[in-house]
Image: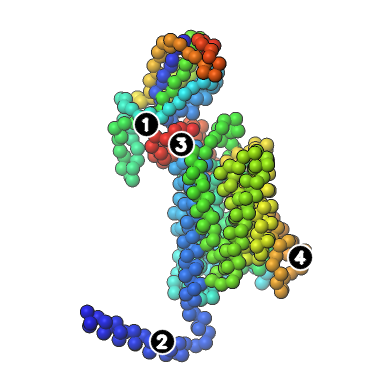
Amino acid sequence: MSRFFYRAGAALLVCIAAAPATLLAQDPASELDIIDTGTTAWMLTSTALVLLMVPGLAMFYGGLVRTKNVLGTMMHSFVAMAIIGVVWAFVGMALCFGETRWEVFGEGNGGLIGWDPGLFLLRDIDATIGRWGAGLPDLVFAMFQGKFAIITPALIAGAFAERVRFRGYCLFITLWSLLIYCPLAHIVWGGGFLTGKAIDFAGGTVIHISAGVAGLVAAIYLGARRGYPRTAMHPNNLTMTLVGAGLLWVGWFGFNAGSSVSSGLKTAQALTVTQIAAATGALAWIFYESLHLKKATSLGLVSGILAGLVAITPAAGDVQPWGAVVLGAVAALCCYVAVILKGKLRYDDSLDVFGIHGVAGIVGAIGLTFLLRPQDGRPPFMEQLWHQTAGVLVSVLYAGVMTLVLVVLVDKTLGLRLGTDAERAGMDHELHGETGYGLLNLN
Amino acid sequence: MKLIIAIIQPDRLDAVHQELINHEIFRITVSRVTGHGKQKDQELYRGQEITPSLIPKVRLEIAVNEEFVKPTIDAILRGARHGNGQVGDGKIFILPLEECIRISTGERGGTAI
């Protein structure tokens, strides 16, 4: 025993003695290569938190569909973790954060897509630090961003819930991630032509607007579920939906506060407004509901949470708490109206992907211009407003048109829409050969 | 008056329900039951095909006046069959119904159904 302590003590002494020597031996440039443990620890935590949102989303969506589709719907989220988890390591990271290519707006103005052979299977960042955040191992950033790539296509699944084939869905999200998410993420974050112009702190444009619009387009092309809107399609388990929404809220702290890619003031600001906007959105939604329907519903409350969270996502680093209150309340109102309008327009965006994510994303991306924290070096108001509008337009048009192309392509080849009999039987029985619950009542 | 009890496969419930609606039969009671017939059902459990000893089924109870007995049976037959009919598609039982009382009004007999 004493021998062990002796050895450990000796090793420690050697380390202490050697440490300054190694520091001195390095050239000044590589001092940046020292890992910032604070930032790294928070970014590792954020990475895990954003991944937690995916099962959260699975529970949120899973509770909202009918009993016979609960597993099929949860599989849409879980299989995204599997597919995008692999695709991202192979090429996703390179396409989003590689060197910018196809500079159609002139040299140096940023291009449309990234590519860097060294990022294929993350080969060149195995042991590098600080490329995307000071003192942060590059692998952590790659994995953090990979979680965003997972949740975005999973969000879309809510729009065409209860009526798509599993194989077709798998192909659809793979192609969607490569052809729509990667270019958009590159354009807004990775060095493309809107990087540094449009403010999109954690993914209002790249994630929520693109997923919302994609959902809308796919839902309209694929058509409504059989019996919609005549037949009531009740949620099979709202308790699960509530827990899912809770997990989403918790995970969103990683999503927004992690997007500061640091562990400091900006992180604190993002975390604070995330909390305030989510709470305001929830409160506002049940307030509107109480006025309109005389009752506050649990689904309303969690819809408000999501509306607030989505709206604050692009703005998290750049507005103050009062701005978060405004965004939360306005987003909840717009989403509330959008969800009612959906019923009137009779398209079947089953779980309101556009009504919540699309609408609140647009409210946040445009609305943040009016609420920016005063800071030196900001462009004039109108210029910023134009950049924000351009970001929204690019996302809406690109995601809209490309999703239509993809949906048609997948539907005509592998088949995306379920057949009548299969849809009636339910996805769990038909596609997965399983049942979600024991003897719970049917709906 | 007759009480029609049908045991069908869960995945055909929607089809049967739709057929019943098409035949203007709107008042039904549905419950989830387990049971055992001739059929062997197979489910997947971690990659293995397993045959459960008791199989999930759906039980429909429909109380009808005489003129609705045939349409109800037709509707169930049409909705509940897999393809042209397979072992395990279920059974229909028809029982005489002595009395029917609507609780809200106290009405009795055929008009209460």
Spot occupied by residue A53 in the image (x, y as percentages of width and height): 50, 55
Q: Position of residue A165 (x, y in %)?
A: 49, 41
Q: Are marks 1 and 4 in contact (CB under 8 Å)?
A: no
Say which residue appears at 50% left-offset and 64% top-offset: A46
Other residues around mark 3 within 10 Å, as few (<14) / some (14–19) / many (≥20): many
Mark 4 or 2, nearer chain start: 2
- The chain identifier of the residue carrying mark 1 reads B
Q: Quadrant of residue B97?
A: top left
- Label 2: how many Cα within 10 Å (few below 14, some 14–19, many 20+): few
Secondary structure at badge 2 equals helix
Q: Which mark is residue A19?
A: 2
| Mark 3 residue element | helix
Respond whether the residues carrying marks 4 and 3 are from the same subunit.
Answer: yes
Residue position marked by numbered label 1 in the rendering: B56
Residue behind mark 3:
A68
Element at badge 1?
Answer: strand
- Identify the residue under disc 4: A381
The residue located at (69%, 52%) in the rendering is A330
Q: CA distance from mark 4 to mark 2?
A: 50 Å
What amino acid is labelled 3 in the image?
Answer: Lys
Three-letter amino acid code of the residue under disc 1:
Pro
Task: Name the kind of residue labelled 4 in the image.
Answer: Phe
Pointer 4 with pointer 2, Cβ within 8 A: no
- Residue drawn at 58 percent across, 33 percent down: A228
Nearer the observer, B89 or A362: A362
Pick whichever of labels 4 and 3 is earlier in the sequence: 3
Is the residue A9 above or below the residue A349 in the image? Answer: below
